[in-house]
Amino acid sequence: MNYEQARFNMIEQQIRPWDVLDPHVLSLLAAVRREDFVPPAMQALAFVDTQVPLQDGNPAGPCMLEPKVEARLLQELQVQRHEKVLEIGTGSGYMAALLAHRAMRVFTLECRPELVLTARENLRASGLTNLTVVDVDAAGGARGLPGEAPFDVILLSGSVAQAPQALLEQLKIGGRLAAIVGDLPIMRARLYTRVDPTAWSEVDLFDTVAPRLEGFAEPTRFSF
């Protein structure tokens, strides 16, 4: 495979048509080698408009989101060089790498031990030094990282029924949280901004679907 041509095609045919036009984001996507974060057995899917499973035999489990979804979330968060970022759901480390290229400091949480090891190795190979992969238990993502709060940016790299209040409260005033919220068949990427100590604004960005992040509460379902 000609990786550089495939990367160019991904950007021009998938990402730009999805209204990702920020030149800094586009340059970053051209520079960070997505193929280095894809499981070897899935290399052919590195630049395809699809989710890439990260665990053998578990297609509904953790995955790399579609390149256009990753790019759009990165654009909407508008990460700045002086900012501190928290990611929930490290996966293979690709989104953490993108965030680390834009932020001052990145903490990324992962509850699957094999993915913690994979992400650490991938990120070590990338040469990035301003990020930390934190190994947490299954409920750790929903708790966030209060010891390092407040954060300028929080990204949930997967879906949840709703954004936990505990994470929203770890944002600085003016801080942004992006998450894919809702239930199948309808989910939406949503951007929350903390406007004061007790209030957050919400903007729906686009419709999409993503695998559930582990350890986040589901709404109670009543039966009669």
Image: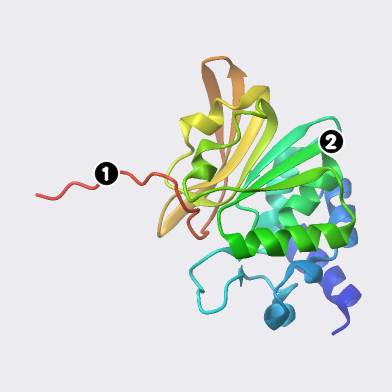
| Residue depicted at x 75% and y 58% | 120
* Badge 1 or badge 2: first in the primary sequence: 2
Residue 15 visible in the current orientation: yes
Residue that sits furthest to the top in the current view: 197
Label 2 CA crowd tier, 10 Å (few <14, some 14–19, many 20+): some
Question: Does dot 1 land on a helix, a strand or a loop?
Answer: loop
Residue 121 is situated, as x and y percent measured from the top left of the image, at 78, 63
- Which mark is in front, 1 or 2? 2
Which residue appears at 67% of the width and 39% of the height? 86
Instruction: List x then y, in percent, for residue 92.
Output: 69, 62
Q: Which amino acid does label 2 sit on?
A: Met
Residue 150, located in which quarter of the rendered image? top right
Q: Is residue 114 above or below residue 202?
A: below
Q: Which label number is shown at residue 104?
A: 2
Say which quadrant the N terminus sits in: bottom right
Whether 140 is drawn above or below 37: the answer is above
Locate residue 198 relative to residue 119 in the image: left or right: left
Disc number for residue 61: none
Please name the residue that numbered disc 1 is placed on.
220
Q: Nearer the viewer, residue 130 or 194?
A: 130
